[in-house]
Image (cartoon, rainbow, N blue to C red):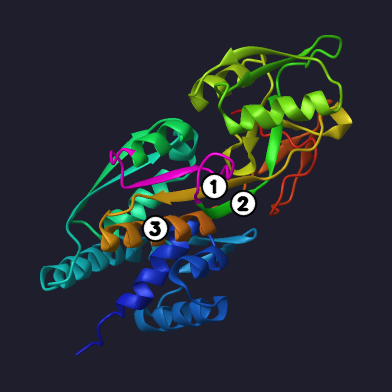
């Protein structure tokens, strides 16, 4: 009788496929890269087929690997369902979490996916509002948790991620140099708006707020249309945006900190479980990482993958 497939090896196999590399998969499954490589060698020996081939700095599936992928996902799903069916301690219930829409757009898909797979019997109720409003909702017991912009002057939160804050403009429109900087920012109580204005005033640069909205979609639309400049965390940069630096006349900005708030009295088991998934998801998020970049003069220039964006980096719009 043939030996059964190892579900742990299959989980690692799926993680490699989903992440496109052994390195990122190792972070997701909490193993060293060498351990991941060893698991894949053993899985290939077990099925008697090569599963991956090199693809630049990453890997891609062979035809045989693609054939195994469907079976691997089904085996893992059935295994998880079987374990959950006999788990008397599985979490159930609902938890309410709030987040600004820009964080929801960038971070929540992975958080929801991770949490839903691990705790399928827990309902997530998600509210998208500005950080200041979420803090108020939390105070009034309308939320159990909130992912907010950390601002120790106005609210207490546990910092779970820190990253650069960038000036951004359209990559496809020229920025006027003889007029005040046109800004698209959040409301007056928005921490990023306050940082942007303070930085411009600190270097004596004129500005004019043209668009005000708590919606990141609205702000990003104004930027991409070439109508305004804004500020965004590095991981939230979108295709078609160009990072502005001191060479463009824009002062450096302090890093942005993302914080978690919890309501006293909320279910400790549910909030702890969701908190752990949020932290794990944020740890695995990489900055925007385009395949190609274009210099401001319009000449194409290949850019190697790297952990941080270079000054003047443009994200192509296609």
* Residue 156 falls within the magenta-colored stretch: yes
Q: Does residue 32 appear to the left or right of 251 in the view shown?
A: left
Across and down, in percent, residue 123 comes to: 21, 48
Q: Quadrant of the C terminus?
A: top right
Give the spatial CA distance, label 2 vs label 3.
16 Å
Give the dominant element type of the magenta stretch: helix, strand or loop.
Answer: loop
Q: Quadrant of the N terminus?
A: bottom left
- Closest to the observer: 46 or 239? 239
Residue range in magenta is 140-157
- Location of residue 225 (image quadrant): top right
Across and down, in percent, residue 17 comes to: 45, 60
Could you tell which of marks 2 and 1 lies nearer the N-terminus?
Answer: 2
Residue depicted at x 29% and y 79%: 5
Give the spatial CA distance, label 2 vs label 1.
6 Å
Could you tell which of marks 2 and 3 lies nearer the N-terminus?
Answer: 2
Of the numbered discs in the image, which one, if any, rests on residue 275? 3
Q: Does residue 270 appear to the left or right of 197 in the view shown?
A: left
Across and down, in percent, residue 11 comes to: 36, 70
* Residue 163 falls within the magenta-colored stretch: no
Q: Name the residue carrying label 1.
A: 258
Q: Is residue 151 above or below residue 190?
A: below
Q: Does residue 82 appear to the left or right of 16 in the view shown?
A: left
* SS for dot 1: strand
- Location of residue 315 (image quadrant): top right
Of the numbered discs in the image, which one, if any, rests on residue 162? 2
Give the spatial CA distance, label 1 vs label 3.
13 Å
> Is the C-beta separation of discs 2 and 1 under 8 Å?
yes
């Amino acid at each position: 009788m043939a030996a059964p497939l190892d579900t742990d090896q299959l989980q690692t196999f799926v993680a490699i496929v989903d992440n496109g590399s052994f390195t990122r998969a190792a972070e997701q499954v909490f193993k060293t890269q060498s351990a991941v490589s060893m698991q894949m060698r053993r899985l290939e020996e077990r099925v008697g087929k090569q599963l991956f081939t090199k693809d630049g700095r990453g890997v891609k599936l062979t035809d045989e690997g693609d054939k195994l992928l469907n079976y691997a996902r089904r085996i893992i799903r059935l295994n998880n369902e079987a374990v959950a069916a006999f788990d008397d301690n599985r979490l159930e219930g609902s938890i309410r979490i709030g987040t600004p829409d820009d964080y929801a757009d960038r971070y929540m898909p992975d958080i929801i996916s991770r949490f839903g797979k691990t705790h399928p019997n827990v309902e997530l109720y998600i509210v998208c509002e500005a950080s200041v409003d979420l803090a108020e909702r939390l105070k009034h017991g309308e939320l159990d948790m909130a992912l907010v912009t950390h601002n120790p002057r106005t609210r207490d939160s546990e910092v779970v991620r820190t990253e650069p804050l960038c000036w951004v403009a359209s990559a496809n429109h020229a920025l006027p140099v003889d007029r005040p900087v046109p800004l698209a920012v959040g409301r007056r109580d928005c921490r990023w708006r306050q940082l942007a204005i303070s930085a411009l005033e600190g270097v004596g640069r004129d500005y004019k707020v043209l668009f005000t909205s708590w919606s990141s979609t609205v702000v990003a639309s104004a930027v991409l249309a070439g109508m305004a400049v804004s500020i965004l965390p590095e991981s939230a940069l979108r295709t078609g945006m160009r990072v502005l630096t001191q060479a463009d006349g824009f002062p450096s900005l302090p890093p942005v900190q993302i914080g978690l708030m919890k309501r006293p009295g909320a279910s400790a088991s549910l909030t702890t479980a969701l908190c752990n998934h949020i932290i794990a998801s944020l740890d695995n998020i990489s900055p925007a990482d385009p395949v190609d970049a274009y210099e401001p003069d319009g000449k194409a220039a290949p850019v190697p993958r790297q952990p941080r964006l270079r000054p003047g980096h443009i994200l192509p719009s296609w």
